[in-house]
Amino acid sequence: MALEFVYLPADRVTYGVGALADLPQQLDRLGAQRAFLVTGQTITTKTGLLDRVKALLGPRLVGVYPRAGEHVPRSRVVEATTAAAEAKADCLISLGGGSPVDTTKAVALALAEGITREEGFDPYSTRFPPPGGPKRPFTTTRPLPHIAITTTLSAGEHTPNAGSTDEAKRRKDGIAHPLLAPKVVILDPEVTVDTPAWLWASTGMRALDHAVERFYSPGHQPLTDPLCLEAIRLLSRFLPISTRDAQDLDARLRCQLAAWLSIYGAFNAPVGLSHAIGHQLGGRCGVPHGVTSCITLARVMAYNAAAVPERMAAIAEAMGATDAPAAVDAFVKGLGLPMTLSETGKVKREDLEPLAHETFVELRPAHNPRPIRSAQEILEILQAAW
């Protein structure tokens, strides 16, 4: 049986200390004259990073949307899309973590496909099956180019996927198309130094979750396997160091590179149960993605362990341990991050059953190494995580 690997139409990753200064040259290369920037309120109000980016862009910056929110509420995507259209943008820039990145991808889709209302995203949903029938093809026009400047380790800047939350239904859906991948990614450890320690560490756990679930995915690939193992090695060593000392730019950069490695080939080697639970915990309860990985990854690994013993052994070796789920559990504890749902203060017991149902609806049967046959199995994991 022939297999395939799909390469994304991304142009380049610029990385290293001082890489942000390359932004004007990247705009020149893309032929962009009217850049529209999407960011979140933390960067807008608490750091000088936005001012640095504005100075680099000069008159080519034609607008800023500062309200990108956690888990990408569709209402804010529509707001940002309207603002970008009114500004006649010819390039989109995201500044921040996973929420600005995914918001910008969704804006790119909305501008290309003429989506002006929240329900307009439904036909493009990656849910199984999508709401409203078969998924609509992405054929109208090419989306605007997207330059991603990232401040966390969520790694969404390297993928063509984006999540968005239907606020009325308290459910998170996804969109995915190769053309939604950012054309340029800028990884500069200097822009991460003001990222809160808990956010840096928890998004590092999200990167570890990417690497683990892609390594033991039933769809794992020979190109992604060694990259995932190297990501696990780098994060195991450098995430604690870089969390303790934000000024250790070498350790920060190594974590940024690990996040990139963890998610390279995401369109080919899909993630599984830990991510699916995390999506729904975010959409329904507002738990940050990185925190969901802290709570779910070790438990899902334990659930899957008997199905992929050789791969679990390789993960354990990469972490310098003998038991992979136990090593992840100890790693989270060492970072001082939440380890149970109740610790988040956002999840109620009555949420567990609908969370299990929505996770079961989202999860593709072939994406987890141990088949999930019912929502009850997921509910039992959530109850253990409470």
Image: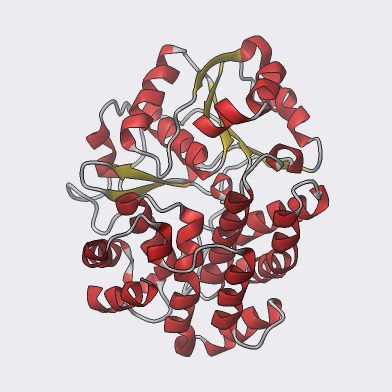
Q: In which image quadrant can residue 186 be found?
A: top right
Residue shown at 49%/58% (left/top)? Answer: 291
- Measured as percent of width and height from the top left, residue 152 is found at 61, 46
Residue 276 image position (x, y, % from top left): 38, 63
Q: Residue furthest top?
A: 59
> Closest to the observer: 370 or 41?
41
Q: Quadrant of residue 238?
A: bottom right
Q: Is residue 209 left or right of residue 119?
A: right
Could you tell me which quadrant the C terminus lies in?
A: bottom left
- Is 268 located above or below residue 248 in the figure? below
Taking the image as shown, residue 219 lies to the left or right of residue 27, namely: left
> Relative to the observer, which residue lies in front, 338 or 253?
338
What x and y, as percent, mark residue 104? Answer: 48, 34
Question: Between residues 289 and 84, which one lies in front from this camera angle?
Answer: 289
> Horizontal placement of 362 versus 303: left or right?
left
- Above/below status of 174 relative to 227: above
Residue at the far left in the pictured view = 132
Q: Is residue 311 visible?
A: no
Residue sitting at 32 percent across and 59 percent down? 347
